[in-house]
Image (cartoon, rainbow, N blue to C red):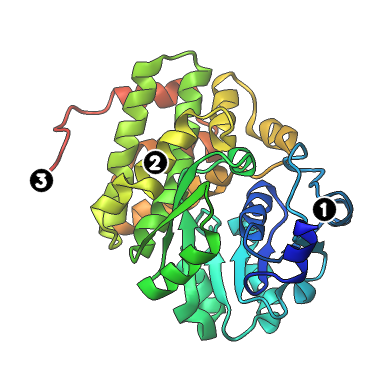
């Protein structure tokens, strides 16, 4: 009876989630703790199951979702009247999805990107891409990132993330939408720092997984994570990020989780590469997107454009796109010329 009252009298306006994968499902469930949510998915099976059984049969099928979530195959139906629209689609399809979505967005809607990556063709961050595609919503954009596995979020385990916007007022409005007893949200105006931290950590996670797949130990993993922080920070600062952002939740926090957690898709790719499997075979068997594979190319190209040295990223790029042997990657990283740990 209490639940029916909640559904009939929601405590806040409609929210929308664009993307029916693991993370989209988890964020829809977070938002549904405070009000009604419509979720767009490409799969009719997913839509029917969420509406009838409150379960996403393809992603996190063990989780019972909040009954306030209604799924649809129609972008128009999902976005219409929504005052917050959260984009949770792979970055390589973001341009196409947002172009289709744009006519249906409410003029006052906050637009939240929870996708971590850099577009391959343009080397645009999601802020740059969304500002280009949604100029009328440029001042209503925010970006969610931080250490957060979908499975643990759906299990309502304590999680902390960051929402960034050029306007702290916009970030704080988004913060109020997402905050629950188990999902804690911090705010910042350092959009580029949050975006780069979230995207580049996936590349380092592949390298960390390779080390694990090769049978290396904790020393190797610690070295890769620490030096990964250093090169992410170099590129971030060159592009205008604040160094402290990259030592926070969306930087070091997300990097540690993705490089060490058993639920990390990007680390899994690296582990399997280290064991000798081919990339195409690994990705085909996964059935989910590992953003770090495409981001490795974008990150490498960005480092070349910015003139920033990123040796781990360069080696991951060579491994993924030039068929370099993982053992050679390790040897070349360890055989680099000696240098100071911190350059002035």
Depth check: 286 or 16 in front?
16
Structural distance between the alpha carbons of marks 2 and 1: 31 Å
Q: Which residue lies under the disc numbered 3?
A: 344
Structural distance between the alpha carbons of marks 3 and 2: 25 Å
Depth check: 44 or 129 in front?
44
Q: Which residue lies under the disc numbered 2?
A: 253
Answer yes or no: do the residues labelled 2 and 1 have beta carbons within 8 Å?
no
Q: Which residue lies under the disc numbered 1?
A: 50
Q: At 80% across and 46% down in the image, what residue appears? A: 55
Q: Is residue 273 left or right of residue 308?
A: right
**Badge 2 or badge 1: first in the primary sequence:** 1
Q: Mark 2 or 1, which is nearer the eye?
A: 1
Task: Relative to 133, say whether 338 is above or below.
Answer: above
Quarter of the view holding residue 7: bottom right
**Quarter of the image with the N terminus in it:** bottom right
Q: Position of residue 29 (x, y in %)?
A: 67, 53
**Badge 1 or badge 3: first in the primary sequence:** 1
**Badge 3 or badge 2: first in the primary sequence:** 2
């Amino acid at each position: 009876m209490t639940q029916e009252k909640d559904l009939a009298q929601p405590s806040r306006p409609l929210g929308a989630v664009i993307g029916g994968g693991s993370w989209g499902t988890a964020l829809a469930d977070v938002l549904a703790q405070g009000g009604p949510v419509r979720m767009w998915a490409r799969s009719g099976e997913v839509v029917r199951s969420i509406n009838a059984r409150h379960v996403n049969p393809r992603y996190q099928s063990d989780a019972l979702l909040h009954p306030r979530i209604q799924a649809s195959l129609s972008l128009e139906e999902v976005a219409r009247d929504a005052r917050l629209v959260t984009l949770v689609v792979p970055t390589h399809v973001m341009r196409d999805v947002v172009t289709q979505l744009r006519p249906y967005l409410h003029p006052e809607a906050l637009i939240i990107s929870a996708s971590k990556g850099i577009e391959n063709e343009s080397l645009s961050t999601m802020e740059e891409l969304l500002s280009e595609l949604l100029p009328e919503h440029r001042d209503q954009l925010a970006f969610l990132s931080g250490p957060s596995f979908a499975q643990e979020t759906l299990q309502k385990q304590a999680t902390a993330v960051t929402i960034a916007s050029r306007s702290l007022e916009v970030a704080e409005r988004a913060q109020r939408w997402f905050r629950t007893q188990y999902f804690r949200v911090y705010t910042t105006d350092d959009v580029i720092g949050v975006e780069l931290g979230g995207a580049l950590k996936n590349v380092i996670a592949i390298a960390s997984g390779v080390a694990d797949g090769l049978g290396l130990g904790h020393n190797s993993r610690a070295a890769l994570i620490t030096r990964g922080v250093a090169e992410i920070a170099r590129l971030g600062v060159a592009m205008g990020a604040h160094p402290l952002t990259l030592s926070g939740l969306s930087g070091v926090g997300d990097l540690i989780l993705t490089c060490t957690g058993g639920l990390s898709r990007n680390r899994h790719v690296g582990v399997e590469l280290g064991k000798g499997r081919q990339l195409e075979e690994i990705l085909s068997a996964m059935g989910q997107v590992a953003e770090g594979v495409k981001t490795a190319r974008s990150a490498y190209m960005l480092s070349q454009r910015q003139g920033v040295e990123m040796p781990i990223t360069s080696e991951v790029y060579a491994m993924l796109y030039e068929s370099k042997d993982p053992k050679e990657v390790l040897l070349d990283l360890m055989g680099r010329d000696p240098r100071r740990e911190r350059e002035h």
